Image (spheres, helix red, strand yellow):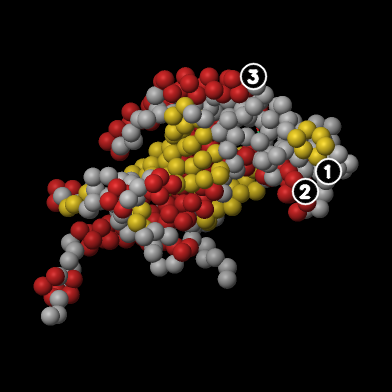
């Protein structure tokens, strides 16, 4: 069955060394401010971070809006963005030669066999993380929806690179100072000492002709309880977030809240007690406060009023200057993998990709619950839900006194 066009979704197209990347976003309500500056700032952050390769010096990624926007606002039609590739040379055989020696860890081997060729370039051009420029542009619209309509804020950063890990706690109240700490850090982490250690690790990896990965984290503040659903596996918000995270190039694991640590603790050490604080009834928790947030903001596949906390694990980039044992696909003889210009570490960039990709998925679940054709209608739906939720119990049937003996 075709998907209805009011379902918030997106698609990207484009090769790493083709003329451009394209993103199409469906289901954006009319009247949303499509803030090019916000999107271009995210694109610039995606290009940055210590350890990036030569490509980022050639590109200045910005969007050109092709459809769906009039005088800075969405009109309810499909939105299309174009991000030009300056390093466009896909058909130039001299500058973009075939690749016959697959890189372990990359899509090269599996893709070449899948598409019945011995030239890995046919696969790698689309599998390349260059695609994430279009993905960040598209998913940043989810971020704009969350902020403008629902007052929900998103924050992503690098938790660790190899063993260099920041211990800084993330709280909504500190958001402004967290953003400035992250923006001052060359690796997008949260303190100076960790930044220094992470840069040293990346510098050493470069000397060793090696690469490094790490963990990135994303926090989403201001979601009320009840977004997502426990009705079917594919409705569950945590499942949808996991799908979005695992769809990012080079991600090998995702966690919500405590994540994999849950299996090392007992129930009383994992589950977050519930209290009610009437003075907080106008906050997104609707007054249901929790002394901890091990659940990472989701229970039963729905938001529970606490911040959503997502961790993603990125493997080291699979293009190594030293090469790795591989096989020439034409001769079947042992040969080291082919070197293509690449990054030593792209964890910082990946943090930008993840926070926007997660924001889009959460925005999509918000639009399913509250969505109308316009920003005005959607905001009215949202506010009336909150008004009713705050006045629970609604009638005698919801009241404990109504229990039939
Ligand atoms: C990237 C662009 C690519 C790579 C990198 C990410 O450009 P090029 O191949 O021309 O150097 O630098 O892609 C990969 C790490 C990869 O494995 O594909 C970008 O814009 O993010």
Q: Is mark 2 within 8 Å of ligand 1?
A: no
Residue underneath mark 3: 207
Q: Is residue 82 visible?
A: no
**Residue 338: image x %, image y %?**
77, 33
Q: Which residue is mark 2?
A: 112
| Dot 1 and dot 2 residues touching (CB under 8 Å) | yes
Q: Which mark is residue 295?
A: none
Q: Earlier in the sequence, mark 3 or mark 2?
A: 2
Q: Which residue is at 43% across, 54% downward? A: 238
Q: Outermost residue, bottom direction? A: 405
Q: How many neighbours does mark 1 have within 10 angstroms: few (below 14), some (14-19), or many (20 or more)?
A: many
Q: To which quarter of the image does residue 21 belong?
A: top right
| Eye-nearest disc, 1 or 2 | 1
Q: Secondary structure at mark 2?
A: helix
Residue found 78% across the figure and 51% down from its top = 113
Front-most of residues 15 and 159:
159
Residue 114 lies, in percent from the top left, at: 75, 54
CA separation in Å, label 3 and label 1: 29 Å
Q: Are marks 3 and 1 in contact (CB under 8 Å)?
A: no
Which of the image's four quarters has the C terminus? bottom left
Quadrant showing the N terminus: bottom right
Q: Which mark is residue 329?
A: 1
Examine the rendered structure and indicate whether residue 182 appears above or below residue 393: above
Whether label 3 touches label 2, CB < 8 Å: no
Sequence-first disc among 3 and 1: 3
């Amino acid at each position: 069955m075709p998907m209805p066009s009011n379902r918030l979704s997106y698609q990207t197209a484009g090769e790493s060394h083709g003329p451009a990347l394209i993103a199409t976003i469906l289901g954006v309500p009319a009247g949303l401010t499509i803030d090019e500056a916000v999107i271009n700032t995210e694109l610039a952050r995606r290009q940055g971070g210590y350890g990036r390769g030569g490509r980022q010096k050639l590109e200045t990624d910005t969007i050109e809006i092709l459809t769906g926007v009039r005088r800075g606002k969405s009109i309810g039609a499909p939105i299309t963005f174009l991000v030009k590739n300056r390093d466009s040379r896909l058909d130039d055989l001299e500058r973009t030669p075939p690749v016959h020696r697959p890189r372990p860890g990359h899509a090269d081997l599996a893709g070449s066999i899948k598409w019945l060729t011995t030239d890995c370039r046919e696969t790698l051009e689309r599998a390349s993380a260059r695609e994430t420029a279009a993905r960040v542009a598209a998913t940043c619209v989810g971020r704009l929806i969350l902020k403008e309509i629902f007052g929900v804020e998103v924050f992503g950063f690098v938790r660790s690179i190899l063993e260099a890990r920041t211990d800084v706690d993330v709280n909504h109240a500190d958001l402004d100072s967290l953003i400035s700490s992250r923006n001052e850090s060359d690796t997008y982490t949260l303190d100076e000492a960790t930044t220094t250690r992470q840069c040293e690790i990346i510098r050493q990896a470069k000397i060793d002709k090696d690469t490094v990965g790490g963990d990135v984290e994303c926090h989403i503040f201001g979601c009320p309880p009840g977004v997502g659903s426990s009705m079917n596996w594919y409705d569950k918000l945590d499942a949808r977030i996991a799908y979005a995270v695992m769809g990012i190039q080079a991600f090998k694991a995702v966690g919500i809240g405590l994540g994999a640590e849950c299996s090392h603790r007992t129930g009383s050490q994992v589950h977050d007690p519930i209290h009610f604080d009437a003075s907080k009834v106008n906050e997104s928790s609707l007054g249901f406060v929790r002394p901890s947030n091990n659940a990472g903001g989701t229970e039963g596949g729905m938001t529970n009023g606490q911040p959503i906390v997502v961790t993603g694990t990125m493997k080291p980039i699979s293009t190594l200057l030293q090469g790795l044992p591989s096989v020439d696909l034409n001769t079947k003889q042992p040969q080291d993998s082919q070197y293509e210009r690449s990054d030593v570490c792209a964890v910082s960039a990946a943090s930008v990709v993840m926070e926007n990709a997660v924001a889009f998925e959460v925005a999509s679940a918000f639009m399913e619950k509250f969505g109308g054709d316009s920003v005005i209608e959607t905001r009215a739906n949202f506010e009336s839900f909150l008004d009713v939720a705050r006045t629970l119990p609604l009638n005698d049937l919801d009241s404990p006194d109504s229990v039939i003996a």
